[in-house]
Structure formats: C-alpha cells, structure tokens
Image (cartoon, rainbow, N blue to C red):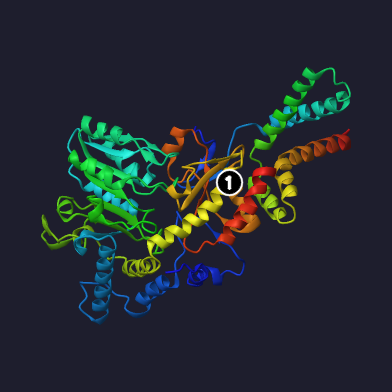
C-alpha cells in the first residue's frame, strides 16, 4: 500500500483537538492513539462495562467475548502457538517482574543481560541478586556499531551457570536492534531460558515468537498505539507451567480451602483480580491499526524521516549521535547530545519555540550512561504520523541552537 | 553524588545542577570579568604583550563560562530564549548565553545603588 501520512494523521484526535499545531516526537515513551483505539475503549464503558467469565449475564458475555478475542488477536500478532500463552499484564515492567519472581532460582544461578537495559530489565535482576544467591552478569553492546560480540556472549554462557538470558529487542536509547534469533540460539545451546524485552519493537518489527525461539517476550501496548497500563507477557506453555504466580487472588484459582488452593490453568493463574478489559479491547484495535499499515511500511517511513534528520545533524561538530551513524540501524530513534549544552534546557526551548516535544534525559538507562560517562541526551523518536515537514521544522529549530547557543 | 550533576527522574532529567556558589560568582567571578574586560580593552593596542593577553582572555572566558553554567532560573531562561526564537534565533541565543550574566549585573547594580543611597 502507498503510505499517505496525512490520512494517517487524520486518524489521531490530538492533531484536530489542539488549536495550536505541535510536533510530537517522544514516541519511544508513548505513541498517540488513533480514533479506532479510543472508540474501542469507550465502547466497553458505553455498552458492556462488566466483568468477564464470572458474570453470566448479557454484559458479562459480551465482555468475555471481546476479552477472549483480544487474547486471540495478540496471540496471532506474535504468532504464539496458543492464545493461552498470552498473559495480560500492566506493562513490560510487570511482565519482567513476573519472570523474576516466578522462576525457581537455585543458589549459584546467573542472569545475563546486556549492559544497556532499561531499568525495567535491570532492577528486577539487581534486587533478585540481593535477595537470593544468584548473580547478575552483563554482556556488552557496541552502541555505535549496533552490534554484539557473539563470541564474548557465548564465553559468558560457557563459563557460568546462566539460567536466564534477558535482553532488549530494540533499544529505547539508541534504536538499535539486537540479533535476537542468533542470541537465542546460542543461549539455548547452553540450556538458558530466554526473555526478550520487545517494548520498542512491535511497530517496526514483525515479532514472531516461534521464529525467534524465545521462551518469553514482554511488551507494552502504549508504545504501539494501544492504551496505557496494558502489557503482554508471552510465554511458551511449558515454561509458563513452571512459573509461580507473582500475585494471588480472584481468577487465579479454581478452588480454595482455608489452607490450600488449586490454581487455574494458564494464563488465568497469572491474572489476579478484575482485569483491564478496556485495555485488552483497545489493544486489539491497536493491533488492527498496525497490521493495516504494515510494519515494513512503517519502518520505511521512519527510515526516510530519520535519514533526513541524521544527514542534517551529522555535519555539526558539536553534535554527538548516541548510536550508529547509519539510520537504517536505528530507524525510529535519533539520540544525540550537543557539546556544552544541557539537553533538558534544549528540550524546553524546542517546546517553547516550536511546540516540538522530544525527550531529554538518560531514558531509564542510568547504569549505561554512568558506564559511558555520558550526560543526559536528547532523544527524537519517530512514529507513523510524523512528516517530512515536521523534520524540516525540527532541523530549522535545532540548527540555530547548535550554532548560537 | 551522581556524575550527571543533575536531578534525574526515571526517564528524563531535570535541569543541570551544580554547587558553584552564587555568592562566589557574584563577588569573585563577576569582578574578574569586569576587570579583565576593561584591561583587555585598554591593552588591546599593545599587541606586544600577547601572552599577557592570553591569560586575561582565559580568565575572562572561564569566569563567563562559570557564570553561564550556574543553573539560575533555568525555566525562565529557556522560556525567554524559546519565545524569542521565532523573532530572531541569534537574539534568542544571546539571551540564552548572557541570561545569568545579566542577573549578576543586575544584582551588582542593585548593590551599588543601595550603597549609594545608604552612604
């Protein structure tokens, strides 16, 4: 299909509802939501705002049906073998914590992550290492080449008792994508469980869990046009059966006595309490939206914009790009810093002068910034509704800042 | 203390923070800037003392840098520079660069005026 960005923009209410024009380029944090997603969320509240499963009335049946449909849709989206391998969570962070709390860790077990994980994929392991006798190890990612030393990765696996390897699919800091299939293949050779943080990947990559071979993947829907507070944990059935639920309560059991209980089947034993129905239904609409556009088309559009942006900034002496020079290796993100400027101040000036919304900071990756001795940076993260004109405006705004500030 | 010299939120960052004293900049750096500037202007015809010029220039530049890096009303500075941007990016850049210096200049003018009134 041909990519008509203006038609796409028409589907996003903030462009119509805000009287003043704005440029939103903080999509790695959260994307805007299309009308179809908003409508599907409000439809739940407007037409059948009730519980699923436990209620046998009309509204209950409607909610159960929509809720199950959403699970099936998400299951097909990631090509899971069964809808029961999809667990609804609050977000990626909660999904990763379910794994951290649910695995039966033994003394001496190791967890291996990259050195530039989001805090969501660092802190659960850091605290686990403090609580239990397990070790948290890291392997290096070359952010400027967008590559991983695979032999170094394998050496760590060979020399340690690595029970779990957990790494990002696409980085929220630099936008690079790891060779997930290859890393999984090596990790599996040494019997490790593999968890992939796909939070940043779902819009630009067709994530096929069977093809990747990972045991678990986690992602949040708010980065993929879906509602806030809704995430997914995919797990292979045999791995999910081995996990202990993180929280207990309604829906997680089929029977209970004062001193014992019988757990529900997967995935329900992991979904305690009343669920985020509108979140699930809205996520289903978000997936329709992504599939209608096609991830390859989205990626091509983002790359076109990022190339324009990179070409404009690459020639500036004061600019340092945090990532590979080639935008094809980081199509959705350009993270950079300007010598002798506080990037928080730059982000405020961009907002104040042109209503350009970008993100300054360490992007939830404090440990890596410490290691690299990097000060907070400015991240431009692109999405389907960004236009060439917006990129030109950004360049027009940032160039004088680089030269005159 | 964190190497960022900045108060960090989880994802973003607050404005840079350092611990250069306002009083120190006011009583030491600002007078150094004024004196070195005056000397540079006076001595500018005397090209013979190139090395001395370099010292003065370094003093002037480093004190200016110290003052401009002090986080003083950072939000106001950015808002002001941001709103001037569409009028003139150069003017906006000058506002951004010399915002702190203007504050110190203002404080000195205030002090001198008060002293004049009192004595």
Q: How many marks?
A: 1
Categorize mark 1 by other alpha carbons within 10 Å: few (<14), some (14-19), many (20+).
many
Residue drawn at (58%, 46%) of the image: A313
Does residue A394 appear in the picture of this structure?
Answer: yes
Residue drawn at (29%, 33%) of the image: A151
User: Which part of the image, by quadrant, shows the C terminus of chain B?
Assistant: top right
State whether residue A55 is above or below residue A348: below
Counting from the top left corner in percent of width and height, residue A244 is at: 18, 50
Residue drawn at (57%, 69%) of the image: A18
The quadrant holding residue A80 is bottom left
Residue drawn at (65%, 31%) of the image: B21
User: Which element is circle 1 on?
Assistant: helix
Q: Chain of mark 1?
A: A
B95 left or right of A42? Answer: right
Residue that extends furthest to the bottom in the rendered view of this protein: A58
The quadrant holding residue A147 is top left
- In the picture of the structure, the residue carrying the numbered disc 1 is A313
Counting from the top left corner in percent of width and height, residue A145 is at: 43, 39
A24 left or right of B50? Answer: left
A262 left or right of B84? Answer: left
Residue that extends furthest to the front in the rendered view of this protein: A2
Which of A5/A48 is in front?
Answer: A5
Which of A139/A387 is in front?
Answer: A387
Counting from the top left corner in percent of width and height, residue A251 is at: 20, 64
Does residue A330 appear in the picture of this structure?
Answer: no
Counting from the top left corner in percent of width and height, residue A139 is at: 33, 35
B101 left or right of A380? Answer: right
């Amino acid at each position: 299909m041909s990519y008509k960005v203006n038609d796409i923009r028409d589907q996003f209410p903030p462009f119509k509802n805000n009287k003043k024009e704005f440029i939103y380029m903080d999509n790695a944090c959260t994307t805007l939501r299309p009308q179809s997603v908003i409508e599907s969320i409000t439809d739940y509240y407007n037409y059948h705002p009730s519980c699923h499963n436990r209620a046998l009335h009309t509204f209950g049946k409607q909610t159960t049906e929509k809720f199950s449909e959403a699970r099936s849709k998400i299951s097909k989206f990631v090509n899971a073998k069964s809808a029961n391998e999809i667990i609804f969570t609050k977000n990626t962070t909660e999904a990763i914590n379910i794994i951290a709390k649910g695995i039966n860790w033994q003394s001496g077990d190791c967890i291996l992550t990259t050195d530039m994980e989001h805090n969501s994929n660092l802190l659960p392991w850091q605290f686990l290492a403090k609580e239990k006798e397990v070790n948290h190890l890291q392997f290096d990612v070359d952010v400027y080449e967008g590559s991983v030393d695979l032999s170094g990765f394998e050496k760590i696996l060979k020399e340690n008792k690595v029970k779990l390897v957990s790494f990002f699919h696409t980085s929220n800091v630099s936008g690079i994508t790891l060779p997930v299939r290859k890393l999984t293949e090596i990790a599996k050779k040494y019997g490790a469980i593999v968890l992939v943080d796909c939070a940043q990947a779902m819009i630009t990559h067709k994530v096929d869990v069977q093809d990747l071979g990972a045991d678990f993947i986690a992602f949040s829907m708010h980065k993929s046009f879906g509602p806030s507070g809704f995430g997914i944990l995919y797990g292979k059935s045999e791995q999910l059966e081995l996990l202990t639920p993180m929280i207990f309560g309604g829906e997680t059991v089929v029977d209970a006595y004062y001193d014992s209980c019988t757990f529900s089947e997967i995935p329900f034993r992991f979904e305690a309490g009343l669920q985020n129905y509108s979140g699930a239904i809205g996520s289903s609409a978000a997936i329709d939206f992504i599939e209608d556009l096609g991830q390859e088309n989205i990626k091509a559009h983002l790359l076109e914009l990022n190339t324009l942006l990179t070409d404009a900034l690459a020639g500036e002496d004061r600019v340092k790009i945090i990532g590979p020079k080639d935008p094809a290796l980081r199509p959705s993100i350009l993270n950079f810093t300007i010598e002798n400027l506080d990037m928080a101040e730059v982000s405020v000036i961009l907002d104040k002068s042109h209503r350009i919304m970008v993100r300054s900071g360490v992007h939830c990756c404090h440990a890596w910034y410490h290691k690299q001795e990097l000060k907070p940076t400015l991240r431009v993260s692109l999405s389907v509704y960004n236009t060439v004109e917006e990129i030109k405006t950004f360049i027009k705004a940032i160039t004088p800042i680089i030269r005159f500030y | 203390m964190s190497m960022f010299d900045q108060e960090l939120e989880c994802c973003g960052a607050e404005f840079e923070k350092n611990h250069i004293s306002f009083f120190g900049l006011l009583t030491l750096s600002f007078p150094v800037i004024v004196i070195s500037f005056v000397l540079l202007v006076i001595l500018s015809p005397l090209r013979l003392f190139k090395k001395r010029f370099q010292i003065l220039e370094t003093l002037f530049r480093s004190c200016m840098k110290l003052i401009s890096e002090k986080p003083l009303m950072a939000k106001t500075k950015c808002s002001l520079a941001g709103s001037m941007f569409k009028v003139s990016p150069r003017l906006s850049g000058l506002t951004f660069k010399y915002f702190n210096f203007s504050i110190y200049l203002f404080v000195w003018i205030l002090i001198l005026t008060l002293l004049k009134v009192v004595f």
